[in-house]
Image (cartoon, coloured by chain):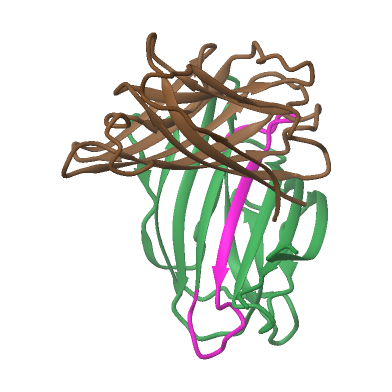
Chain colours: A brown, B green
Amino acid sequence: MELLYTSTLNTDLDDAHSEFECNNIFTTEYHTYKIFIRAIGNQSTYKTYRLMNSSGQITTSTYAHDSIHFRNSGVANTDSTSTTGAGFMADAHSLRDIRFQPGIVFTVFNPADANYKTVCRVEGISDYDANWITFESNGSRESTLQAVTGFAYRAYGIGEDIEGMQIEVYGIK
Amino acid sequence: MSALVKISEQTFTTAADITITGFTTDYDIYYLNVQKARTTQGNAYLEFRFTTNTPSAGTPITDSDYQQSGYVGHAAFTSPAAWSSSGTNSPKWTYISQNNNGEGYYNEAWIFNPADATQETTMLVTATGNARSDAVGHMFTSVRLTQNSVVDGIQIYPSGGASYSVQEAEVYLYGLKTS
């Protein structure tokens, strides 16, 4: 597993972003990518991701995903399709509460091969409240056969911001 | 320098099963990455057994000595289904619900202490893939082999019987350097 890319977005709570793009990082040299994300937002909603093509555009494909979500209220399972957001990166109920930096492991399989639909997987931890944390396991895939070269980490809700994040991308070949 | 050392890389096409050997005492932890896995027919489980080197390399351990615990999420399930079993000889690897070109399953597995005859072998597995045209399936599970065997590999096979086979899969095996 080789470190390919690292980036840090340093902001404060008054300097917000709704999206963070990492493009031109996936090639056919690696079959699997492990992306470690630590991020803080300013709203209590989800963070999602979209995939990007070689033109640097976010793909217009529909995504299908299945999420298993553990938190204090129990275990929930969600299946859905979406054109606005793929799998949930984090259930950011309290991401604005910077008691710790919620950690996400984002795995992307075989993205640069145009003959296969890109499959992704997320395992994430986030803060629920003072007494509870959440665990999210999510699987998703893009509906279109195309080469994928990057991804965008996105705030899901209108007016939501990404306040700061660190990303490390590793490739496995 | 990478901490993951590649041991083997194999492609399977229309095969009865996926058998990978290469676990030795060189490493305590192994990482197995299975890509594009499909069966010749849909609605089939892929199951697995560890293999041992007696009487020959890659011999499946078919004893009912496997324990498994995990969850599987799938569009066909209204709530996540538990994969729990004790004393089984056919633990689950993943569920394959279709076999369309370009829509395989992707697995990662971490195998602990397989070649150490003084310890039981355990494994963590995740799977994500294309359940059908508008849905995916994904699971995570833990497995324990309750016998102190020298495990030299793993055999992954369709559970549907002789009419089922592995249509496609790419498999990468790595050892994890720990020092």
Quadrant showing the C terminus of chain B: bottom right
Give coordinates of residue A107: x percent, y percent.
59, 41
Residue sitting farthest toward the left:
A131
Residue A121, how many percent across, how many down?
54, 38
B96 vs A92, nearest the viewer = A92
Does A45 sit left or right of B145 as displayed? left
Q: Residue at x 50, y 86 (%)?
A: B148
Q: Which residues are magenta?
A: B96-121
Q: Is residue B131 above or below residue B162?
A: above
Point 61% across, 49% down: residue: B107
Residue B23: quarter of image: bottom right
Residue plotted at (50% across, 21% down): A154
Between B45 and B9, the one lying in front of the other is: B9
The picture places residue B21, in percent across and down from the top left corner, at: 73, 71
Residue at the farthest bottom position? B118
Q: Is any atom of residue B163 visible in this view? A: no
Total marks in image: 0
Q: Main secondary structure of the magenta part?
A: loop
Q: Quadrant of the N terminus of chain B?
A: bottom right
Say if B51 sits above or below A158 in the image. below
- Is A35 drawn above or below residue A162 in the view shown? below
**Residue B12 visible in the shown view:** yes
* Residue B32 on image: x %, y %: 65, 59
Q: Nearer the viewer, residue B63 or A89?
A: A89
Looking at the rendering, which quadrant does residue B176 occupy?
Answer: bottom right
Quarter where residue B110 is shown: bottom right
Q: Is residue B44 located in the magenta-colored stretch of the structure? A: no
B91 vs B114, left or right, is left
